[in-house]
Image (cartoon, helix red, strand yellow):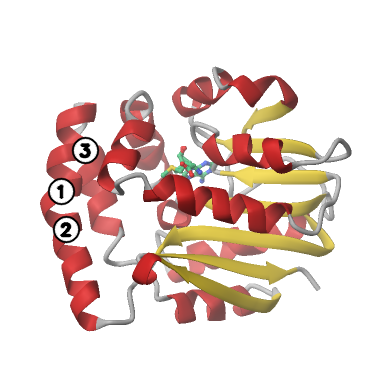
Amino acid sequence: MSKGVQHIFSEVSHTYELVNHLLTFGLDVFWRRRASCTAAKGGGERWLDVCSGTGETAAYLQRYADSRASVVTADFSLPMTRVALHKHEAKQIAMTLADAKQLPYPDDTFDVVIITFATRNINNSRDGLLKHLREFRRVLKPGGRFVNLETSQPKSRLIRWLFHLYIRITVKPLGSFISGSKSGYAYLSYTIPRFYSAEEFARMLSDAGFMNASFERLTLGLAAIHRAIKP
Ligand SMILES: C[S@@+](CC[C@H](N)C(=O)[O-])C[C@H]1O[C@@H](n2cnc3c(N)ncnc32)[C@H](O)[C@@H]1O
């Protein structure tokens, strides 16, 4: 599964940001900034953006960081990380190639771990996702903050139905047309309607050993930011 995901992101790396902005009418920028702001509140010295892709979230974190904080990224896709390296903020960010299921950091390293629009990609099963969440908890310091931004399931049945319809009729055709990758956007459009509700994902955070799991729905519940603390 993870080799397949790696392949998908190597195919779409150059058009990834453009497709996101078009498909969400730019909302992904607003959501990402809000999640980065949430993560930055509370400070700390070491911040990790995991499954960082082309580095958009890490760039926001870097902008919100005070002079004591250092931002680190981890992603297993070289083509996605290469795009990140071209960002203006890249000079101040330590970028690593690493698999999220086994991060190359000791226990209790980070004040913040954030993941944006990638939890769906590590969700090959409930148990698989829980293992990843426990790995994120492992590298957080006690009291450290976990922040997750992901598409979600609107509470209203009508809005949920319209959202899933929109995903079906736009993500695959538009994403495939712009990126040239049919399988990539077929996979991404498959995962969105199947991801957990905000309530269920909050329960999973507790099951993974976090405390004070809470969430904020964004734009009619199309996306959600979850927060939790390592005890
Ligand atoms: C949809 S992109 C999200 C990128 C970025 N976080 C954002 O907000 O745009 C998913 C990213 O997760 C990475 N990824 C997926 N599974 C991974 C894993 N097991 N370990 C490391 N990176 C992974 C992919 O390479 C890809 O760059």
Note whether residue 154 is visible: yes
- Mark 2–mark 1 CB contact (< 8 Å): yes
Instruction: Tell me which residue sits at (61%, 62%) in the image.
Output: 133
Q: Nearer the viewer, residue 12 or 31?
A: 31
Which residue is identified by label 1? 170
Q: Is residue 22 above or below residue 35?
A: above
* Residue 166 numbered mark, or none: 2
Instruction: Tell me which residue sits at (38%, 34%) in the image.
Output: 17
Which residue is identified by label 3? 175
Element marked by disc 1: helix
> Is 16 on the left or on the right of 58, as rendered?
left
Instruction: Tell me which residue sits at (47%, 50%) in the image.
Output: 30
**Upstream in sequence: badge 3 or badge 1:** 1
The image position of residue 212, as x and y in percent, is 70, 79
Task: Place residue 162 in its image quadrant.
Answer: bottom left
* Residue 107 numbered mark, or none: none
